[in-house]
């Protein structure tokens, strides 16, 4: 697992998954086993922007269901910490490479 910098509660976190050239559809992002949203693949990546993660430690993963030509893919888990400390920034903090 990789740990990311702490970010303040209620600040935007941009989570990006990078796939491969011909991937289409959507990527689902998870916090543990709970879906936190989806991102539509554009070019070779899908992004979810969220500010709804609770204070604490989150294990973020991304999955893609595959298509007629490619097997499903899943990222490794990465750790994101949401802190109680105030701040005024947006974090572009996570990029997962999905592998089948």
Image (cartoon, rainbow, N blue to C red):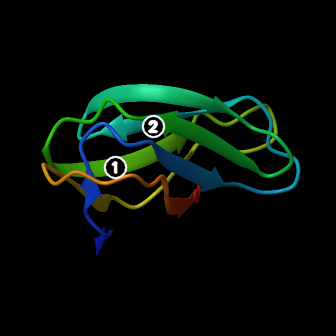
Quadrant containing the C terminus in the rendered view = bottom right
Q: Residues within 10 Å of mark 1 (few under 14, many from 20)?
A: many
Q: Position of residue 43 (x, y in %)?
A: 86, 48
Task: Report the front residue among 84 and 3.
Answer: 84
Q: Which residue is mark 2?
A: 29
- Report how far apart the C-alphas of labels 1 and 2 lie in the structure: 7 Å
Mark 1 and mark 2 in contact? Answer it, CB < 8 Å: yes
Task: Report the front residue among 97 and 89.
Answer: 89
Q: Quadrant of residue 11?
A: top left
Position of residue 11 in the picture relative to residue 67 (left or right): left
Say the numbered circle drawn on residue 46.
none
Q: Which residue is mark 1?
A: 60
Whether residue 71 is visible here, answered yes or no, is: no
Quadrant containing the N terminus in the rendered view = bottom left
Tell me: residue 13, above or below residue 3. Answer: above
Task: Report the front residue among 72 and 89.
Answer: 89
Position of residue 23 in the picture relative to residue 52 (left or right): right
Q: Position of residue 25 (x, y in %)?
A: 74, 29
Element assignment for label 2:
strand
Instruction: Please tell me which of labels 1 and 2 falls first in the chain.
Output: 2
Q: Position of residue 70 (x, y in %)?
A: 74, 44
Residue at 60% x, 52% y: name it.
17
């Amino acid at each position: 697992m990789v740990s990311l910098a702490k970010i303040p509660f209620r600040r935007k976190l941009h989570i990006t998954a990078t796939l491969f050239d011909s991937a289409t559809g959507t990527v689902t992002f998870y916090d543990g086993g709970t879906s936190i949203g989806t991102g539509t693949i554009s070019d070779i990546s899908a992004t979810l922007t969220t500010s709804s993660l609770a204070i604490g430690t989150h294990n973020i993963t991304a999955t893609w269901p595959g298509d007629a030509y490619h097997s499903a893919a899943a990222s490794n888990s990465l750790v994101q910490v949401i802190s109680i400390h105030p701040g005024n920034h947006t974090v572009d903090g996570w990029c997962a490479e999905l592998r089948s």
